[in-house]
Amino acid sequence: MAAASVPPGLSLREATQRKLQRFSKLRGKPVAAGEFWDIVAITAADEKQELAYKQQLSEKLKKKELPLGVQYHVFVDPAGTKIGNGGSTLCALRCLEKLYGDKWNSFTILLIHSGGYSQRLPNASALGKIFTALPFGNPIYQMLELKLAMYIDFPSHMNPGILVTCADDIELYSIGESEFIKFDKPGFTALAHPSSLTVGTTHGVFVLEPSDCLEYRDFEYRCCHRFLHKPSIKEMRQFDAVCRPGHFSQQDLSRGDTPSLKLEPEHVYTDSLFYMDHKSAKKLLSFYEKIGTLNCEIDAYGDFLQALGPGATVEYTRNISNVTKEESELVDMRQKIFHLLKGTSLNVVVLYNSKFYHIGTTEEYLFHFTSESSLKSELGLQSIAFSISPAIPECSGYTSCVIQSILDSRCSVSPGSVVEYSRLGPDVSVGKNCIISGSSIITTAVLPAYSFMCSLSVKMNGHLKYSTMTFGVQDNLKKNVKTLSDIKSLQFFGVCFLSCLDIWNLKVTEELFSGNKSCLSLWSARIFPVCSSLSDSVTTSIKMLNAVQNKSAFNLNNYKLLSIEEMLIYKDVEDMITYREQIFLEITLNRKQSELETS
């Protein structure tokens, strides 16, 4: 039972800090049996991503940033058709069976879906969303460590099975110090968070069976009648998903900036992670082995959870309004999954004092790291995290955020901007709401407001080179057109892309784009110069950006050019990790010298 005198926001912060402290004690130490996960598995979209993840996991284990004695795996999706996170789940089950045979039926397993290319937050594209840096901790926490910390109480209160989660979201919750969430019921068990009806339209929504609990608790175990995937408000009402006053709820969680819990006139309970027991996992595995190859995208939430509960009906299998790409086999596959899982129970843990955050877009990333968001106080996010940096001013509730970087005391970074794994020289001025990642800016440079800049090491023909992607943080890299005549509808830094090509003296031909020639976008546009040094790469890309801003010519014709799509193919993960390590060592040495001088 929660202490009534503790405000919900404060109890959430205290509970979060307790989990972080507990995880911190396990970093770099062997864990006892049953104390932690038996297996932590991360999914990858392709072999390049798989290798990048394995390299980073190896580095983390070597530097003792993760608990030891745990099996860490990366499971790659099969080549060919995109199979979605549901397909990745099925693929991961098969990998577990191959590796462990019948042994995995006694394991607690954490499965983290991280197989996307992060087109809406491209500084996570090269090394992966699950390795996105967060502004706190020493060594710096990344999303992987945060996930492990937030779920630290789960394995010891869980029957053998699999907890499924995504790499770019954060679930915070508070329950009594002596209480624990148990994952011990047959079938599926999901966490549920009170949310506004508007938030419900972009999430999964639970239609719960009536509760017989008459007193207020921090959490409650409920049975789910049926699960709705991204329903309209009309559908929420139609299927009795809407709850009215009587329970605590939260305001709009899409930005996660609720200062405290409050009574809502109406609310729904939305999804985040879910658990399936070993029997359910084996049922899905047998199904996957029987069908052999997947030729369509399966959603672990929409296609698994909608089949569960006594109120589930087959109608959803024909609804393709939320599907990005319609495959001929999709409806048939959904119906097979529905009949496979029909009758399986869906248990829900309703967390009344909880928050769900998503950090998968440039907008969300900048908001949570630079504003006075509740996430900042709950996690203890810092404006200067393990960095050498001048003091950071605040303006209208916004600051800049510096993560494992070295900034000259004379450089200037405006509020609302994030700098990670970078070096900035004395004559560098960064405008507001910028993201700078993995870069080295030594010469005089002015980055306009809303700039995005991320440098990658690339290996081409055996030679180490560098390429820096740059555009506006609000640019839509996913927007695509089918023909060259339509590229006028694409925008780079808010400017018509055709005008930009003219400024850079680049001709509009099919060769301008990599990959699928009927899917043309900023993601596949060959516009980013390849240079022999990191600083040259950054300087050239800044000139390219400034040329667009000032409408002055800058000839890119003399450069070898790559698209972001190609950068990810040629990326040299080892060199990028080495660059980050050099910054880490320099900051560590600087701190030691400062301690000696003050002692």
Image (cartoon, rainbow, N blue to C red):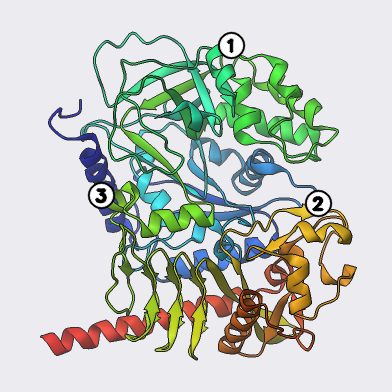
Q: Name the disc covering residue 140, or none.
A: none
Q: Which residue is mark 2?
A: 80
Residue 324 lies, in percent from the top left, at 73, 40
x 61%, y 45%: residue: 96
The tag earlier along the polypeptide, 1 or 2, is: 2
Between 5 and 574, the one lying in front of the other is: 5
Residue 486 lies, in percent from the top left, at 84, 57
Amino acid type at mark 3? Gln
Q: Which residue is mark 3?
A: 17
Task: Left or right? Give the position of 104 relative to 29.
Answer: right
x 15%, y 89%: residue: 597
**Residue 525 appears in the figure:** no
Which SS class for mark 3?
Answer: helix
Tell me whether circle 2 and circle 3 mark residues in contact (CB < 8 Å). Answer: no
Which SS class for mark 1?
Answer: loop
Amino acid type at mark 1? Gly
Q: Which residue is mark 1?
A: 311
Tell me the CA gap for discs 2 and 3: 43 Å
Residue 169 lies, in percent from the top left, at 47, 46
Tell me the CA gap for discs 1 and 2: 36 Å
